[in-house]
Image (tube, grey):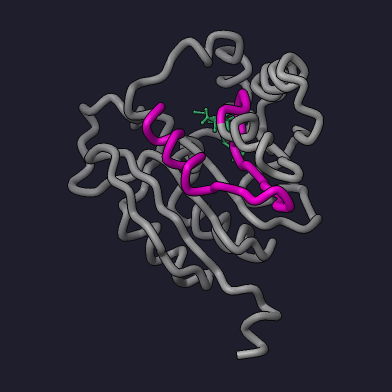
Amino acid sequence: MKRSIEDHAARFDEIASEYDDEGSDEYRACANLVIEHAAPDTDDVVLDLGTGTGAIALALAPDAERVVGRDISEGMMSEAETKAAEEGLENVAFGRGTFREPEYDGEVDIVTSNFAMHHLSDEEKREAISAIADLGPRTFVLGDVMFFGEPNPDEPFYSPEVDDPATVGFLADALTDAGFSLSAVERVHEQVGVLVAERGRPDADQNE
Ligand SMILES: C[S@@+](CC[C@H](N)C(=O)[O-])C[C@H]1O[C@@H](n2cnc3c(N)ncnc32)[C@H](O)[C@@H]1O
Protein backbone atom coordinates (compact mmCIF):
# COMPACT_ATOMS: atom_id res chain seq x y z
CA MET A 1 0.00 0.00 0.00
CA LYS A 2 1.55 3.28 -1.08
CA ARG A 3 -0.37 5.20 1.61
CA SER A 4 -1.47 4.07 5.05
CA ILE A 5 -5.06 2.99 5.69
CA GLU A 6 -5.51 6.22 7.68
CA ASP A 7 -4.32 8.32 4.71
CA HIS A 8 -6.66 6.53 2.32
CA ALA A 9 -9.55 6.95 4.78
CA ALA A 10 -8.84 10.68 5.17
CA ARG A 11 -8.60 11.09 1.38
CA PHE A 12 -12.01 9.47 0.87
CA ASP A 13 -13.58 11.28 3.85
CA GLU A 14 -12.64 14.52 2.13
CA ILE A 15 -14.30 13.70 -1.21
CA ALA A 16 -17.24 11.67 0.15
CA SER A 17 -19.94 14.28 -0.42
CA GLU A 18 -18.94 14.77 -4.09
CA TYR A 19 -17.98 11.16 -4.84
CA ASP A 20 -21.28 10.23 -6.47
CA ASP A 21 -21.07 13.17 -8.89
CA GLU A 22 -17.83 11.85 -10.37
CA GLY A 23 -17.20 8.61 -12.21
CA SER A 24 -16.15 7.66 -15.71
CA ASP A 25 -18.17 5.61 -18.18
CA GLU A 26 -15.75 2.75 -17.50
CA TYR A 27 -16.35 3.01 -13.73
CA ARG A 28 -20.12 2.81 -14.33
CA ALA A 29 -19.75 -0.10 -16.76
CA CYS A 30 -17.57 -1.92 -14.23
CA ALA A 31 -20.06 -1.32 -11.39
CA ASN A 32 -22.93 -2.54 -13.58
CA LEU A 33 -21.04 -5.74 -14.42
CA VAL A 34 -20.29 -6.39 -10.73
CA ILE A 35 -23.99 -5.97 -9.94
CA GLU A 36 -25.00 -8.18 -12.89
CA HIS A 37 -22.57 -10.99 -11.98
CA ALA A 38 -23.32 -10.88 -8.25
CA ALA A 39 -27.05 -11.48 -8.95
CA PRO A 40 -27.95 -12.55 -5.38
CA ASP A 41 -30.87 -14.80 -4.61
CA THR A 42 -33.41 -13.64 -2.04
CA ASP A 43 -31.77 -15.78 0.68
CA ASP A 44 -28.19 -14.66 -0.05
CA VAL A 45 -26.01 -12.59 2.27
CA VAL A 46 -23.65 -10.26 0.38
CA LEU A 47 -20.47 -8.68 1.77
CA ASP A 48 -19.31 -5.62 -0.19
CA LEU A 49 -15.71 -4.63 0.57
CA GLY A 50 -14.50 -1.08 -0.06
CA THR A 51 -18.19 -0.28 -0.24
CA GLY A 52 -17.71 3.50 -0.34
CA THR A 53 -20.99 5.35 -0.81
CA GLY A 54 -22.76 2.04 -1.46
CA ALA A 55 -22.93 1.88 -5.27
CA ILE A 56 -22.86 -1.92 -5.23
CA ALA A 57 -24.36 -2.60 -1.78
CA LEU A 58 -27.48 -0.49 -2.35
CA ALA A 59 -28.04 -1.86 -5.86
CA LEU A 60 -27.92 -5.46 -4.59
CA ALA A 61 -29.95 -4.99 -1.38
CA PRO A 62 -33.44 -5.21 -2.97
CA ASP A 63 -32.61 -8.70 -4.34
CA ALA A 64 -30.62 -10.09 -1.39
CA GLU A 65 -31.57 -11.21 2.10
CA ARG A 66 -28.95 -8.92 3.60
CA VAL A 67 -26.02 -6.80 2.46
CA VAL A 68 -23.09 -5.89 4.68
CA GLY A 69 -20.83 -3.05 3.53
CA ARG A 70 -17.31 -2.58 4.87
CA ASP A 71 -14.98 0.37 4.36
CA ILE A 72 -12.31 2.40 6.12
CA SER A 73 -13.89 5.82 5.41
CA GLU A 74 -16.64 6.87 7.81
CA GLY A 75 -17.45 9.76 5.45
CA MET A 76 -18.10 7.45 2.50
CA MET A 77 -20.23 5.10 4.63
CA SER A 78 -22.21 8.00 6.04
CA GLU A 79 -23.24 8.87 2.45
CA ALA A 80 -24.19 5.23 1.91
CA GLU A 81 -26.30 5.19 5.09
CA THR A 82 -28.13 8.35 4.06
CA LYS A 83 -29.00 6.85 0.68
CA ALA A 84 -30.10 3.55 2.26
CA ALA A 85 -32.49 5.47 4.53
CA GLU A 86 -33.80 7.57 1.60
CA GLU A 87 -34.42 4.40 -0.41
CA GLY A 88 -36.08 2.66 2.57
CA LEU A 89 -33.57 -0.21 2.49
CA GLU A 90 -33.59 -1.93 5.87
CA ASN A 91 -31.50 -5.00 5.02
CA VAL A 92 -28.19 -3.22 4.48
CA ALA A 93 -25.68 -2.30 7.19
CA PHE A 94 -22.35 -0.51 6.96
CA GLY A 95 -19.38 -0.65 9.30
CA ARG A 96 -15.64 -0.34 9.50
CA GLY A 97 -13.58 -3.16 8.06
CA THR A 98 -10.63 -3.60 5.74
CA PHE A 99 -9.97 -6.03 2.91
CA ARG A 100 -7.59 -8.04 5.03
CA GLU A 101 -9.65 -7.74 8.21
CA PRO A 102 -13.29 -7.34 7.13
CA GLU A 103 -14.50 -7.56 10.74
CA TYR A 104 -17.35 -9.79 9.70
CA ASP A 105 -17.74 -13.35 10.93
CA GLY A 106 -21.26 -14.28 9.83
CA GLU A 107 -22.43 -16.39 6.89
CA VAL A 108 -21.66 -14.92 3.50
CA ASP A 109 -22.73 -16.21 0.10
CA ILE A 110 -21.33 -13.55 -2.22
CA VAL A 111 -18.46 -11.11 -1.76
CA THR A 112 -18.28 -8.10 -4.05
CA SER A 113 -15.80 -5.29 -4.45
CA ASN A 114 -15.67 -2.49 -7.00
CA PHE A 115 -12.87 -0.03 -7.73
CA ALA A 116 -11.23 -0.41 -4.33
CA MET A 117 -8.71 -3.27 -4.13
CA HIS A 118 -6.18 -1.41 -6.29
CA HIS A 119 -5.21 0.61 -3.20
CA LEU A 120 -3.48 -2.49 -1.82
CA SER A 121 -0.04 -3.74 -2.85
CA ASP A 122 0.00 -7.06 -4.70
CA GLU A 123 1.12 -8.91 -1.57
CA GLU A 124 -1.71 -7.27 0.39
CA LYS A 125 -4.18 -8.23 -2.38
CA ARG A 126 -3.08 -11.85 -1.98
CA GLU A 127 -3.70 -11.62 1.77
CA ALA A 128 -7.09 -9.98 1.15
CA ILE A 129 -8.14 -12.67 -1.34
CA SER A 130 -7.11 -15.34 1.15
CA ALA A 131 -9.12 -13.61 3.92
CA ILE A 132 -12.12 -13.45 1.56
CA ALA A 133 -11.78 -17.15 0.71
CA ASP A 134 -11.69 -17.95 4.45
CA LEU A 135 -15.17 -16.38 4.80
CA GLY A 136 -16.47 -19.19 2.57
CA PRO A 137 -18.47 -17.36 -0.13
CA ARG A 138 -19.56 -19.30 -3.21
CA THR A 139 -18.79 -16.29 -5.42
CA PHE A 140 -16.39 -13.36 -5.31
CA VAL A 141 -17.00 -10.65 -7.91
CA LEU A 142 -14.05 -8.29 -8.23
CA GLY A 143 -14.37 -5.19 -10.38
CA ASP A 144 -11.34 -2.93 -10.36
CA VAL A 145 -8.55 -1.19 -12.11
CA MET A 146 -6.45 -4.09 -13.46
CA PHE A 147 -3.98 -4.35 -16.29
CA PHE A 148 -4.94 -6.47 -19.30
CA GLY A 149 -1.77 -5.33 -21.09
CA GLU A 150 1.23 -3.22 -20.23
CA PRO A 151 0.58 -0.72 -17.40
CA ASN A 152 0.27 2.83 -18.71
CA PRO A 153 0.56 5.46 -15.96
CA ASP A 154 -0.64 8.17 -18.37
CA GLU A 155 -4.12 6.61 -18.49
CA PRO A 156 -6.79 8.14 -16.24
CA PHE A 157 -7.87 5.09 -14.26
CA TYR A 158 -5.37 5.23 -11.46
CA SER A 159 -2.94 7.60 -9.76
CA PRO A 160 0.49 5.97 -9.56
CA GLU A 161 1.34 7.95 -6.44
CA VAL A 162 -1.50 6.42 -4.39
CA ASP A 163 -2.77 3.40 -6.34
CA ASP A 164 -1.19 0.04 -7.03
CA PRO A 165 -3.27 -1.95 -9.57
CA ALA A 166 -2.34 -5.55 -10.38
CA THR A 167 -2.22 -7.37 -13.68
CA VAL A 168 -5.14 -9.64 -14.53
CA GLY A 169 -2.69 -12.55 -14.47
CA PHE A 170 -1.61 -11.76 -10.91
CA LEU A 171 -5.22 -11.55 -9.70
CA ALA A 172 -6.18 -14.76 -11.52
CA ASP A 173 -3.25 -16.59 -9.87
CA ALA A 174 -4.10 -15.20 -6.40
CA LEU A 175 -7.75 -16.22 -6.82
CA THR A 176 -6.96 -19.75 -8.00
CA ASP A 177 -4.29 -20.18 -5.28
CA ALA A 178 -7.03 -19.30 -2.73
CA GLY A 179 -9.25 -22.08 -4.12
CA PHE A 180 -11.46 -20.09 -6.50
CA SER A 181 -12.10 -20.94 -10.16
CA LEU A 182 -12.57 -18.08 -12.60
CA SER A 183 -15.94 -18.31 -14.31
CA ALA A 184 -15.82 -14.98 -16.15
CA VAL A 185 -13.32 -12.32 -17.12
CA GLU A 186 -14.89 -9.09 -18.37
CA ARG A 187 -12.62 -6.54 -20.00
CA VAL A 188 -14.17 -3.07 -19.75
CA HIS A 189 -11.00 -1.21 -20.76
CA GLU A 190 -7.31 -2.06 -21.10
CA GLN A 191 -7.06 -1.06 -17.40
CA VAL A 192 -10.50 -1.91 -16.01
CA GLY A 193 -12.11 -5.29 -15.63
CA VAL A 194 -14.31 -7.64 -13.66
CA LEU A 195 -13.28 -11.11 -12.50
CA VAL A 196 -15.90 -13.58 -11.33
CA ALA A 197 -14.51 -16.27 -9.03
CA GLU A 198 -16.46 -19.28 -7.80
CA ARG A 199 -15.65 -21.63 -5.00
CA GLY A 200 -17.18 -24.95 -3.99
CA ARG A 201 -18.59 -25.03 -0.48
CA PRO A 202 -16.28 -26.99 1.88
CA ASP A 203 -19.15 -29.34 2.85
CA ALA A 204 -20.08 -29.84 -0.83
CA ASP A 205 -16.45 -30.80 -1.61
CA GLN A 206 -16.50 -33.44 1.11
CA ASN A 207 -19.45 -35.19 -0.54
CA GLU A 208 -17.75 -35.47 -3.92
C1 LIG B 1 -13.02 4.42 -5.43
S1 LIG B 1 -13.94 4.04 -3.95
C2 LIG B 1 -15.08 2.79 -4.55
C3 LIG B 1 -16.32 2.72 -3.73
C4 LIG B 1 -17.42 1.80 -4.25
N1 LIG B 1 -17.03 0.42 -4.17
C5 LIG B 1 -17.86 2.15 -5.65
O1 LIG B 1 -17.88 1.28 -6.52
O2 LIG B 1 -18.21 3.31 -5.87
C6 LIG B 1 -12.75 3.09 -3.03
C7 LIG B 1 -13.19 2.79 -1.61
O3 LIG B 1 -12.28 1.84 -1.04
C8 LIG B 1 -12.07 2.18 0.31
N2 LIG B 1 -10.81 1.54 0.75
C9 LIG B 1 -9.55 1.91 0.45
N3 LIG B 1 -8.68 1.08 1.03
C10 LIG B 1 -9.41 0.16 1.71
C11 LIG B 1 -9.09 -0.96 2.53
N4 LIG B 1 -7.82 -1.33 2.76
N5 LIG B 1 -10.09 -1.70 3.06
C12 LIG B 1 -11.39 -1.35 2.84
N6 LIG B 1 -11.76 -0.28 2.08
C13 LIG B 1 -10.78 0.45 1.52
C14 LIG B 1 -12.07 3.69 0.31
O4 LIG B 1 -12.31 4.24 1.59
C15 LIG B 1 -13.17 4.01 -0.69
O5 LIG B 1 -14.42 4.16 -0.08
Name the residue: 46% across, 37% down: 2
Above or below — where is 13 with respect to 130? Answer: above
Find out whether residue 134 is within the magenta segment: no
Residue 42 at what x, y percent from top left? 70, 48
Residue 195 at what x, y percent from top left? 41, 53
- Occupied quadrant, residue 158: top left
The quarter of the picture where the C terminus appears is bottom right
| Left or right of 31, for residue 24 | left
- Occupied quadrant, residue 10: top right
Q: How many discs mark residues in the rendered view?
A: 0
Q: Depth check: 125 or 63 in front?
A: 63
| Left or right of 168, for residue 75 | right
Above or below — where is 122 with respect to 5? Answer: below
Residue 5 at what x, y percent from top left? 61, 35
Name the residue: 62% across, 37% down: 60
Name the residue: 69% across, 61% down: 135
Find out whether residue 45 is within the magenta segment: yes
| Magenta residue span | 28-55
Name the residue: 80% across, 56% down: 105
